[in-house]
Image (tube, rainbow, N blue to C red):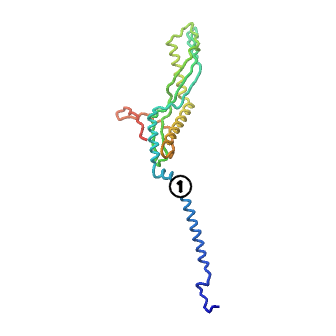
Amino acid sequence: MNGYPPNAKYDEPRPRKRRHGIRRFFRALFLVVVCLAIAFVAVRFGPNLYRRFFGNGNTTWISERFGEELKEKNELVVNEVKLTGQETVQQNAWLIGKVQEVLIPYTYALSFTVDLSLADVHVNDIGDTITVRLPSPVAKYAKLTVDESAVQKYDLLYPLTPERYAEIKNQIEDKLTAEASHNQKYLDAAWQAAVKNMESLFKSIAERSAEGVTCEIQVIRDDRLSQPTETPDGMPEPTVLPAA
């Protein structure tokens, strides 16, 4: 005993302040964790998010270069078909029957091309996708090659003239072209090759840009591109590649 009365201000325990201190500690710890998470997201995804929502400069650059490349290529051979076979052509006469027979072994080649001068290249509103619209591939450059040394002729009663022989070869070529140009298997393979060519060209251009690949490409088949537009007086207008 020191002779002084007890002082409640100093002698009573203070559990309430200790509880407040613990709460402040955990609150500060939570804020630190949140800030670290925000910083990680900003560093990891910030540049891509910024390009997607606030700018598409690199995408525009790629799109412009892509359009220029298509103009330079003009026409792209996307698939080639080669066939080998033998055609037999007969000539019959009334009462006599077969008077001429020709066996023609051949090699036939046909290309499928895409007219890139009709391509439509544009960037979507968000700026993360370049859309390329192309017409369907068409059959071109048919060529029939005949192995003349293996041609067999039976024309004793009705000699084969050079004019008739040339006509037979033209008929064979026209027949093979009509069949191959409408073969769905060949058409599908040609379109798939066209898409792969566009993706490869896009990748090569994007890798040359300062920021690298910052967007995607979408290739769409649009046969309306191959339809000529009409002027008011009924004359078709020349088709021009739209600006990228």
The C terminus: image quadrant: top left
Q: Is residue 25 visible?
A: yes
Dot 1 amino acid type: Val
> Where's residue 189, x and y in %?
56, 33
Rate crowding at label 1 as few (under 14), some (14 to 19) or many (20 or more) other CA atoms within 10 Å. few
Q: Residue furthest right?
A: 1
The outermost residue toward the bottom is 3
- Choose between 89 and 161: the one closer to the eye: 161
| Residue linked to disc 1 | 43
Q: Residue at the far left: name it.
A: 233
Q: Quadrant of the N terminus?
A: bottom right
Depicted 121 relative to depicted 186: above or below: below
Residue 129, given in percent of the width and then of the height, sits at 49, 45
The answer to whether 69 appears left or right of 102 in the picture is left
Question: Which residue is found at the position 48% from the left and 39% from the top?
Answer: 133
| Residue depicted at 34% across the width and 33% down the height | 233
- Callout count: 1
Percent x, y for residue 107? 56, 21
The quadrant holding residue 21 is bottom right
Question: What SS does tag 1 mark?
Answer: helix
In this orientation, which residue lies closer to the viewer: 43 or 118? 43
Q: Nearer the viewer, residue 30 or 216?
A: 30
